[in-house]
Amino acid sequence: MRNLLEIQEQLLPDLMDTFKRRYTILHQIKLSGLVGRRTLASSLSMTERVLRAETDLLKAQGLIEIETLGMRISHAGLCLLEELEPLMKDLFGLVELEEKIKKAYGLRKVVVIPGDSESSPEVKRELGRAGARTLLSFVENGDTIAVTGGSTLAEVAEQMSPLAAGPLKGTWFVPARGGLGESMEIQANTIASKMAKRVGAEYRLLHVPDLLSEDAYQSLVQDQHIQEIVDVIRRSRIIIHGIGDAMEMARRRKLDEDSIRSLQQDGAIAESFGYYFSEEGAVVHKMLTLGLRLEDIMQTETIIGIAGGRSKGKAIHAVLKFGHEDILVTDEAAALEVEKEIDAAAS
């Protein structure tokens, strides 16, 4: 099939362009749920006249439904997209990109979805859906899964759905760390509980701040109830976590100016698990907090990193260079930036 497509692309390039365009339109309608023609044309950088001709054809084929308020994908359209997904990833060059990143960092699996999740809420949802599918493909009954916070992980939780095989028995979702004091929806406790409820698992919560003073840390670490939960977290078989820009995360943690300057001087460009990483993947700073420690991360069986957006490319590269990731789920925009880092290192 791949050879046939390569031949078609050489002999009938216009046909392949049409194929890709109609797939992109159908995929965008799926992501949007219900969308008007003008909004869809704008998001695809396409004129309404061209889009009208394409959507009329898709409707005639029974792939979309057009209503007063807009267009939505039909059941037949959904089935077609599912069948086409592996093929289209190949056509858009994403399979090759996945393999390149996988090989460069020694990963077990890389998943790259089309688009840029920073500029498109629909792509952000698709990134969450890919993260949910990837996580559930590794989860077994009796597992403990540690989850970090952030908007991307919140989207993963939102996209999780009950398993066809039934509830996960003896499985626990736990927060990897304390809370950042942000919106409840993107805190690790909330995300862990939502994930557990979606798949019929259990959950435990850790009600402590993420950033602690030495006195607060020593006090909390002696608490029997907290220590019991922390022990569970540190025995997790799977960790799923986000990856952030170092300076952005420092500001979110409300670090003082001296600490931020120190991070900059040390070359911190990425943050994950409360650890700050340099471009070479070295840990240059760590937060005093309860939850997962570096030694726990190094011994965990499966670590899944998920992050997207063009601006996250260097941060993803730094965390991958750390060398303890197993799975990466990202979007095309971030993956292309990671590819630049790979090529720069090779030159």
Image (tube, grey):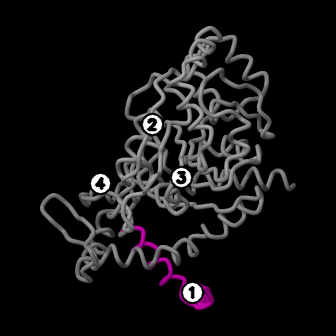
Q: Disc 4 vs disc 2: which is toward the camera?
A: 2
User: Tag 3: residue type?
Assistant: Asp
For marks 1 and 3 on the same chain, the one whose residue lies earlier in the sequence: 1
Q: CA distance from mark 1 to mark 3?
A: 42 Å
Distance in Å between CA atoms under marks 4 and 1: 32 Å
- Please determine whether, in this image, residue 155 is positioned above or below residue 168: above
- What residue lies at 52% left-to-right and 27% top-to-bottom? 178
Q: Which residue is mark 1?
A: 5
Q: Which residue is mark 2?
A: 204
- Residue type at tag 4: Thr
Q: Answer whether residue 165 is magenta in the image.
A: no
Q: Are marks 4 and 3 in contact (CB under 8 Å)?
A: no
Instruction: Describe the element under mark 1 as helix, strand or loop.
Output: helix
Front one among 299 and 86: 299
Which circle's residue, 4 or 1, is located before the other in the chain? 1
Distance between the alpha carbons at the discs numbered 4 and 2: 42 Å
At numbered mark 3, what does the secondary structure look like: helix, strand or loop? loop
Residue denoted by label 4? 39
Position in image of residue 176 (x %, y %): 56, 36
Q: Residue at x 66, y 50 (%)?
A: 337
Q: Which residues are magenta?
A: 1-25
**Label 2's element?**
loop
Q: CA distance from mark 4 to mark 3?
A: 43 Å
Q: Nearer the viewer, mark 4 or mark 3?
A: 3
Q: Which mark is residue 68?
A: none
